[in-house]
Image: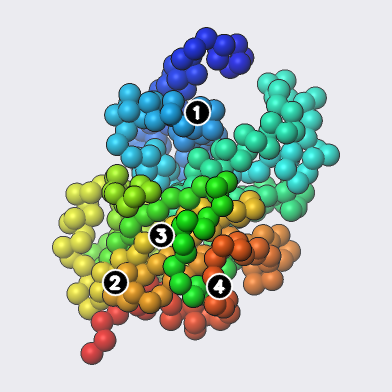
């Protein structure tokens, strides 16, 4: 049954999206239980996620739905539930000649509507720390290869894919009032805490690992006036390999786990606190890290690179938003390490 038919009755879009969310949660939770019961490593891939519903509703109706479901903060449905979000841009945006209704009976959108819905869906996920945008700068086969390689990197498998971000030093923190009206953004307070190696790291690590450290992170969503609306928690294990790769293994943890690990933090390091601003611009994902403690004069822009499998990340394209005041690009690994939280957290004698 078509959604436009159901939407003809006032209030039905809220009922429909509420029902869709029930179905999604049931399917996702059910498959997660099955995977966990196997007792082996597994990856659960979801076609669509809970935040997608925001693209098909007015903002006020979406807020009504969240209130009805007793959702205190959207982070519960976003980074609190999904470890990563991969958005494959519609062919109607950049590969128009391949967009057709003939090979998909359920596709009814015109190219114009497809682009609009794609834009709304991307914006619904703004704020997720692992939001990756896959545009149409390559053919579809290579687009899928990029997705597979990024998935391998995300779950800690060997991959030839370089980190697809380039960093810039900003002269000052962004002025949010200067952001264009059509640029949606999310603001967060982030607390990053480094741990002693023996707390979470196995003693029998692979011989290929030359260095390893771990940290926990609390990520609190702020509204436009700076009020906290909810927090999510995560654990990351970072491994360096002999061949120069960096492998990150991430998982969502509970507040209780976070508190327990926080009490056993590495006392030789500061707790790092940042404000982060996440937004999309010109089909690119950006994150600004504004350090607050233990330093307050560092502001770093993380920009997703427009690159192909045949183009190194350092040669990829980044279109800098004109409303940011960039000092310079971080161009080498030494400078990257200098301005990283791992180095900044160290207590100096």
Residue that label 2 marks: 293
Q: How packed is label 3: few (under 14 Cα within 10 Å), some, or many (20 or more)? A: many
Residue at image point 38% right, 39% down = 74
The answer to whether the residue labelled 2 contacts the one labelled 1, judged by CB atoms less than 8 Å apart, is no
Q: How packed is label 1: few (under 14 Cα within 10 Å), some, or many (20 or more)? A: few
Residue that label 1 marks: 58
> Gap between marks 2 and 4, in whole Å?
22 Å
Residue at image point 68% right, 61% down = 307
Q: Closer to the camera, 123 or 209?
A: 123
Q: Earlier in the sequence, mark 3 or mark 1?
A: 1
Query: Quadrant location of the N terminus?
Result: top right
Between label 2 and label 4, give the one nearer the viewer.
4
Between label 2 and label 1, give the one nearer the viewer.
1
Q: Left of 86 or right of it: where is 278?
A: left
Q: Image quarter for residue 113?
A: top right
> Gap between marks 2 and 1, in whole Å?
38 Å
Q: Earlier in the sequence, mark 3 or mark 4?
A: 3
The answer to whether the residue labelled 3 contacts the one labelled 4, judged by CB atoms less than 8 Å apart, is no
The label number, if any, that marks residue 326 in the structure image: 4
Q: Earlier in the sequence, mark 2 or mark 3?
A: 3
The secondary structure type at the circle numbered 4 is: strand
Residue at image point 60% right, 50% down = 133
Q: Work out whether 45 lies above or below 4.
A: below
């Amino acid at each position: 049954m078509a959604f436009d038919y159901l939407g003809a009755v006032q209030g039905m879009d809220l009922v429909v999206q509420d029902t869709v969310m029930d179905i999604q949660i049931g399917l996702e939770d059910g498959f997660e239980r099955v995977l966990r019961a196997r007792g082996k490593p597994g990856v659960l891939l979801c076609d669509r996620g809970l935040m997608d519903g925001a693209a098909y509703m007015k903002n006020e109706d979406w807020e009504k739905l969240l209130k009805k479901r007793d959702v205190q903060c959207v982070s519960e449905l976003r980074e609190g539930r999904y470890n990563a979000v991969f958005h494959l841009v519609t062919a109607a945006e950049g590969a128009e000649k391949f967009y057709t209704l003939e090979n998909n009976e359920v596709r009814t959108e015109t190219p114009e509507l497809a682009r609009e819905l794609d834009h709304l869906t991307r914006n619904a996920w703004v704020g997720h720390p692992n939001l990756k945008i896959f545009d149409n700068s390559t053919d579809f086969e290579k687009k899928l290869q990029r997705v597979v390689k990024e998935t391998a990197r995300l779950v800690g498998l060997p991959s030839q894919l370089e980190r697809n971000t380039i960093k810039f030093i900003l002269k000052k923190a962004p002025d949010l009032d200067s952001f264009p009206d059509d640029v949606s953004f999310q603001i967060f307070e982030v607390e990053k805490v480094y741990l002693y190696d023996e707390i979470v790291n196995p003693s029998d690590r692979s011989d290929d690992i030359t260095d390893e450290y771990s940290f926990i992170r609390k990520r609190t969503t702020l509204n436009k006036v700076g009020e906290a609306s909810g927090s999510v928690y995560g654990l990351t294990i970072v491994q360096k390999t002999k061949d120069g790769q960096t492998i990150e293994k991430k998982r969502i943890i509970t507040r209780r786990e976070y508190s327990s690990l926080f009490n056993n933090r590495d006392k030789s390091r500061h707790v790092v606190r940042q404000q982060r601003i996440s937004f999309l611009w010109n089909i690119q994902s950006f994150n600004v890290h504004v350090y607050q403690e233990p330093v307050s004069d560092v502001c770093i822009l993380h920009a997703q690179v427009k690159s192909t499998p045949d183009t190194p990340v350092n040669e990829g394209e980044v279109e800098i938003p004109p409303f940011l005041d960039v000092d310079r690009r971080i161009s080498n690994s030494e400078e990257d390490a200098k301005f990283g939280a791992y180095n900044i957290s160290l207590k100096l004698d």
